[in-house]
Image: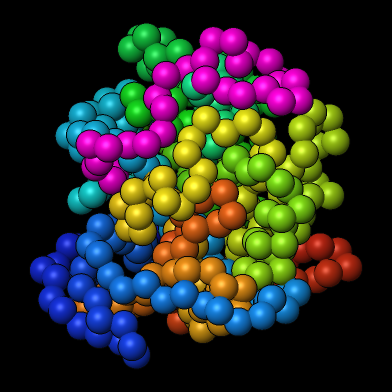
Amino acid sequence: MSMRSFLPLLLAASPHSIEMFTIPMRTIARTKALQRSLSMTASASTSTGTGSSATSGTTVDYGGIPHIGVLVDNKQKALAYYTDILKMKPSPNGVFAGETQIQFLESSTNPDPIDVDPTYNMSAPPPGYIAEGRPVHAGRDRHVAITLHSLEPLKASLEANNVPYTMSYSGRQALFCRDLWGNGWEFGPPVTYAKATRLFPPYLDVDVEAATLETEPIRWGGVAHVGLLVQNTPITRRFYCDVLGMVDETDLRPEALPFPGLFLRCGEQQVHILELPNPDPNSVEQRPGHGRDRRTAYSVKSLVPVVQALEQEGVKYRREVLVTRESVVFCYDPDANELMFVEDGDIQVIQEDMINMAPMVPWTRLW
């Protein structure tokens, strides 16, 4: 499948408002079928829900994960790392890894530890273990999994630049490493991830021609999943599935994994939940705040059911509207992982065959 072309264009911001929210505007030119490039760092009003518990099984039409936001202390330094070492393509506020944008959120007060705890080198720590830093293996940390055509050129680049990495503990074709700011990454060929979900999007199955590799030594596909650290799997499942309407695919999760967790689907991608020690501050009060924190962005056909669910659950959120009339909502999950919902009315919802667990129609792009 051919790669889509991207043309994110940052425009000047102007003040606007929506409903009862008075909000600053941050803009990015929008063209149908172009990747969203959202960089939310301005402050905005906060709305707090105070209603009763949310109804189980909220209906939210997800598209996928259009971008990931990571904390760095210097955008230019981050750009050099991701383009020179990981061979990703630059974008106006980060880089592109195939179909997905990684946005750099510059902060001089990153609350998350960067250094690795060398004693945290086991597959699963004993009960009561308290991490003094990041685990040696980024697969036991918060991370983002991205497909690529082959691990060999990536290994060569990492080794040439003295970047440490580990391979999958389970024997999968997956490599794990971190950037200079402690952000964990997982990389692997499509075969590593195709059977972990029932709706594996074709663009993650990287199509490579020999001529392409002469100018593009690493061919990226896009995000297969994000991995989030949590304290309590049942509480997390209720939030993501019952409140936010994600699909539980945990039956596809390997039984051999030595810690509790979940596989949840949000349109074209997954969220992997890892109940493991978390070295990061995991209360909202300790985080940088909405729009300034590391985040996962989820495209949704409408924000209405998202906002209704958050209000019914009593979850604080912040809503912004762009000059392009796109709306976004920020919130935190129970473990202070930030979520950003991006409204895209053009999303085509996949019709699923729940007997054969497969799309009923030929695959179409969701965002």
148, above or below 284, in the image = above
For image coordinates 34% across by 24% down, the residue present is 180
For image coordinates 48% across by 17% down, the residue present is 116
Residue 236 visible: yes
Q: Main secondary structure of the magenta part?
A: loop
Residue 217 visible: no
267, above or below 111, in the image = below
Which residues lie in the magenta part?
104-132
Instruction: Locate residue 266: give its quadrant.
Output: bottom right
Q: Which residue lies furthest to the right in this view?
A: 355
Q: Residue furthest bottom?
A: 19
Left-right relation of 249 to 212: right
Left-right relation of 254 to 18: right
Please provide percent x and percent y for residue 171.
Answer: 72, 21
Q: Depth check: 338 or 312 in front? A: 312
For image coordinates 81% across by 37% down, the residue present is 254
